[in-house]
Image: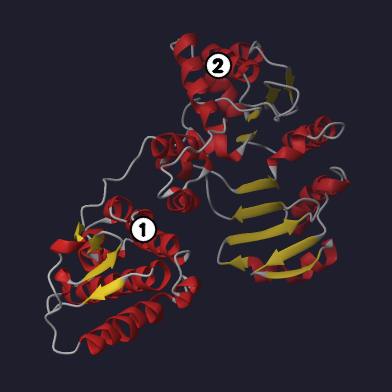
Amino acid sequence: MDRGFEGLGEVLGILESTGEEFRPKRMSLKRRKLKYSREKLRERLHEATFQNHTSFHLLCDQFEENWYALDFHEGREDVRSSIVLRVHPFSVFGEPGKGEERALHLVNLVRALGSQFPVTWGFAHSGTDALLDMDDEQMRARVPQSIDRVHWLNLYGPHMVEKIGRERMLSTPAFLLEELPGGAVLWLTRPTPADFASEEARLAQARALVHLRPELKLEDTLATLRHRSLAFVPVEPRFDTDIADLLTLTLQRSGLDKKHWDVERLNQYHPPQPSEWLAAHQAPKPDVPDVPEAIRLYEHQYAEQLAALLHTEVPSVMKGSPESLPQIDYFLWWRGWGHQLPEAERELLVDSLGAYLGMVMVHTLGGTWVPRRQLAEAAVIVGDKAWLPFVRARHLVQSRQAVLDFSLTQLFRHARRSI
C-alpha cells in the first residue's frame, strides 16, 4: 500500500481480470457485506483499517466458499501485505472440462501478481494437505525459514531464489517453471492441483523437494508424502454395533487430517461388556417407605433435571426415548463434563443420568423399578436381569474415555436383548 489506494487498485485490477468465477462480487468490511466496486471500497476502506493494519474480504459467490482475504501492514519490514484465495469445495478443480481452466486462472493470477509486485513467497495447494505437514509454529510463520515442503503451485521471491541458488532453482524438475520479471520464480508440480495426493503428484513433489534440498533422501521423502495421502483415502466404518451411532457422532469432531486414522482406530474398539447387573432373583427388595413416591422422585425430579440441563444441546432428551441415549452420550463425551464438574454437581449429574436411563428402560422395555435408599442399589428388572443404571452412570462420568466404555447406549441395548 506504499502508493495508497492507487497501489491497491493495481491489485484489484488483477483480481477483477482473473476469470468470471474468481472475480469479486461482494466485499466484507467489519462483517458488513456490500456489493463490490472499487469506488465503494475506496469510500469505506477506513472501516477496515485499525492503526497500521488494513484487512478485508472480497467474495466471489461462485462456489460454496470462494473469497479473497487481503491484509496490508504499514511500517513492517518482513511481510507488508498478503493475499489469500480460498476456493471451496476443492473438488471444483477436478470437474471435467473446467478443472484445468480454473487451475490456469490461478496460475495467471499468481503470475500477474508476481510480475507486477515485489513478492516474497506464495503457494497454491489443498489447504488440508498443507496443514497436515505443518506444526503450530510453521502455521504462524508468514514466510518459511527453509524449504520444508513443495506444493502444486510454488512462488519464490528473489531473496528465496538466491538463498537456494538461482541455477539450482531454475533446474527444478517441474511441469512448468517460469522466471518472472523482478527475479521471482513460479513453478508447478502438475497441470492442476486436483490430483495432489496421487502417486504421480507425490513423486513429483518428492523429486522437486529433494532437488532443492539435496541432503534429503527421495525414498524417505516419498514415504512421508504417501503416508499423508492416506488421510484422503476413505475407510469404511465397521464399528461395534452396540455403539456404532455414538462412535459415528464422535467423528464429527475429527478433521479430514485425522478422520482416516480415527475410523481405523474406532473399527478396532469394543467397549467392555456391561457389569452393572445382577440376576433378577438376586436383586434386593425395595427398602424405601413409599415405592411409588420413590419412582416418582426418580422419573419426575432426577430424570427431568437431565432434560432441563440438556434440552438445548440435546433436544431429543425431552422425548425420553432410546434414540436420545447416543445423543446424550455424545454430548457428555464431547464436553467432557463428568470428570470436570465439582463434586456436588457431578453427583447431581450421576443421579440424573441414572434415573433417565432407568426411566427409558422401564417405559420402552417394560422394566420394573426396584427403588432403594442407596441409589447405587436401585435396579430396573428387565427379563431375567436386574440392571443398575445409577452404577452405570457413575462409571460413565469418570473420564472422557469412560463415556465410550460405559455408555448409556450400550447398557440399554444389552438390556433390550435380555428380554
The image position of residue 220, as x and y in percent, is: 44, 13
The image position of residue 76, as x and y in percent, is: 53, 50
Between label 1 and label 2, give the one nearer the viewer.
1
What residue does disc 1 label?
419
Quadrant of the rendered structure where residue 165 is? top right
The image position of residue 131, as x and y in percent, is: 51, 38
Which three-letter amino acid code belongs to the residue tagged 1? Ile
Kindly tell me whether residue 195 is visible in this rendering.
yes
Q: Residue drawn 82% across and 63% down? A: 36
The image position of residue 6, as x and y in percent, is: 79, 55
Examine the rendered structure and indicate whether residue 248 appears above or below residue 127: below
Q: Secondary structure at mark 2?
A: helix
Examine the rendered structure and indicate whether residue 263 appears above or below residue 280: above
Name the quadrant of the C terminus.
bottom left
CA gap between label 1 and label 2 equals: 60 Å
Which three-letter amino acid code belongs to the residue tagged 2? Ala
